[in-house]
Every structure is written in C-alpha cells, then in structure tokens.
Image (cartoon, rainbow, N blue to C red):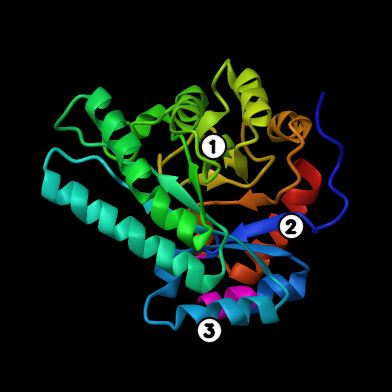
C-alpha cells in the first residue's frame, strides 16, 4: 500500500545541490518564501563563507538544517590517503557543528585498486575512528548505501543490508543509515531492510527523487518524483512504518534541471513532492 498523500510542506527538505546554480543565500530566500521547511547543505556551498553565520542565516529564514553532505570516502590502498580522509571527516564534523547540522551523510568511498572487502573494512575502521569526534560534537553519522554502479570509486556499501550490518556491528548511537530511493529502489529486500532500520532505531534520513527511463547519465540525470520508475510512495510507506518522522529530502543531480530557471524548477519540485511522494 502506498503512503498517504502529502498535503503540506512541513516535512519537505531540499538539498542545496538540487538547486546548484543558486548560492546558499539565494536557496535560503527562495526555499523559505515557497514554504519549504528544511535544507540539507552540501559542503561546496559553504566554501569562502563564515559557516556559523551561514547557519544563523538559514535559521533566520526559518529553515531547519537537516544534515551536511558529505563525509566519507574512507578507503584507499595507501595509509597516507586514508589518514587524509580521516582528517577531512573530522573537518566535516567541525563544519556541521558550526553550521548547526545534526547529521553528516557518509558517501563511504571505494578504491578500485583493491578488493571490495578491503574497502569495506577500511570504511568500518574509518567510521569507528571518527566516532569520538562526532560524539563530542553531538553529530550523527549516516551511512548511505549507493547503487552498485558506484562500487568502483564512490562506495563499497551498495545495499541497505550492508549498511544495516555495519551500523549494527559498530553499535554506536551516533551511527545509523541514510536511505536514498535512487540507490535502493531495485533491491528485492528493501522493505525488510527498512524494517530492520526501524527495529534498530537507526534510520537517520530519507532521500527522494526518481530514476529516468532511459537514464542518459548515471550521475547527473536524476528525475523529479513521478517522472521515472521508482515507487516513491510505496517506499515512503515502508519508511513511515518504522516510526520515522523526519524530513523527506529532495536530492536531484541533473544537468537538465540545472540549466532551467531555478525558480520554475522549485515550483516543479513542490508540485512533484505533493503529487508523487
């Protein structure tokens, strides 16, 4: 059974990367004016800005800062590069604290020069190493499994089962999972694994968009909800059944939409959110 219809925007969050042509200030002003209540900030949007003041600006626009994207990219065959990744994740934790974001989404990374098993071990080791820093800053870490097409360089965590297993093994209240329909809609075990998230109380965030048919670019051709083949409403019903009460985050990378007037694109996002999410 699909989820109940969305009647308002109280749980709508939009990622800053979704409207990439806008500065963070433009996004804040326009999201707020349209009634959007949440924003997930990508780290590139913070470059050259006072992060603390940026967080204050977002809150002045009555936007809840849902998370910071992204940390991760832990694996590498060389120890020096693994250390660099750890340092960058510590920096991300500092940025999240300054911004006022309660969560960092982890795109875990992968190194094609070594077995996936090695990359997965390095991911687990890396997360465990940064937990004390995250806990001190009261920042949660969400392991985001990515579609298997990204197993070469972007993530060796490719199913929700793998993310759930890792979060359970790490066994920290600061570590959970992020569910993104773009990466997981194809998985025959998805409903069961979402239930596991609920049972373990570690479903930290939920990202939505759609899979275009045909998809012309595996990274930069995501669709608006209702344009493709992802059963977004059904997956949302599984998420809500866990007791999840967080935001529904629209995360769209799209060369097509980035070329459009972003004000018109924002209207399309809101319409698709209400009708097809």
**Which residue, given by chain and number where applicable, does mark 3 sit on?**
53
Q: Is residue 210 left or right of residue 31?
A: left
Q: Is residue 21 magenta?
A: yes
What residue range appears in magenta? 20-28
Residue 255 seen in this snapshot: no
Residue 182 is marked as: 1
* Secondary element at tag 3: helix
In the figure, 173 relative to 133: above or below? above
Dividing the picture into quadrants, the one containing residue 263 is bottom right
Residue at 69% over, 40% down: 226
Of labels 1 and 3, the one closer to you = 3
Query: In the picture, which quadrant includes the N terminus?
Result: top right
Q: Are marks 1 and 2 in contact (CB under 8 Å)?
A: no
Residue at figure coordinates x 80%, y 45% from the top left: 275
Tell me: residue 39, above or below residue 271. below
Q: 27 and 267: which one is in front?
A: 27
Whether the magenta-drawn stretch holds residue 271 is answered as no
Total label count? 3
Q: Secondary structure at mark 1?
A: helix
Measured along the vertical axis of the image, is residue 87 above or below residue 114? below
- Residue receiving disc 2: 270
**Residue 9 position in % (x across, y down):** 80, 58
Residue 242 percent coordinates (x, y):
73, 31
Q: Secondary structure at mark 2?
A: helix
Assess whether mark 2 and mark 3 are in contact (beta carbons under 8 angstroms).
no
Q: Nearer the viewer, residue 198 or 269?
A: 198
Q: CA distance from mark 1 to mark 2?
A: 18 Å
Quadrant containing the C terminus is top right
Nearest the camera: 140 or 45? 140
């Amino acid at each position: 059974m699909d989820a109940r219809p969305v009647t308002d925007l109280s749980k709508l969050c939009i990622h800053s990367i979704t409207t990439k042509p806008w500065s963070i200030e433009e996004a804040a002003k326009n999201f707020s004016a349209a009634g959007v209540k949440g924003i997930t900030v990508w780290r590139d949007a913070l470059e050259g800005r006072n992060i603390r003041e940026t967080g204050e600006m977002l809150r002045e626009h009555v936007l809840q800062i849902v998370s910071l994207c992204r940390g991760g990219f832990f694996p590498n065959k060389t120890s020096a590069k693994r250390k660099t990744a750890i340092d960058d994740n510590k920096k991300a934790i500092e940025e999240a604290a300054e911004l006022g974001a309660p969560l960092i989404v982890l795109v875990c990374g992968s190194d094609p020069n070594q077995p996936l098993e090695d990359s997965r071990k390095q991911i687990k080791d890396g997360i465990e190493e940064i937990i004390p820093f995250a806990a001190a800053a009261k920042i949660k870490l969400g392991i985001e499994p990515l579609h298997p097409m990204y197993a070469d360089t972007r993530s060796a965590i490719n199913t929700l089962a793998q993310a759930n297993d890792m979060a359970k093994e790490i066994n920290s209240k600061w570590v959970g999972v992020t569910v993104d329909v773009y990466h997981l809609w194809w998985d025959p075990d998805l409903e069961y694994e979402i239930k596991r998230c609920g049972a373990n109380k570690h479903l930290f965030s939920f990202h939505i968009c759609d899979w275009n048919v045909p998809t012309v670019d595996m990274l930069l051709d995501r669709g608006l909800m209702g344009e493709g083949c992802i059963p977004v409403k059904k997956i949302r019903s599984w998420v809500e059944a866990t007791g999840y009460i967080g935001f529904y985050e629209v995360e769209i990378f799209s060369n097509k939409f980035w070329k459009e007037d972003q004000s018109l694109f924002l209207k399309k996002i809101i319409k698709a959110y209400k009708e097809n999410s």
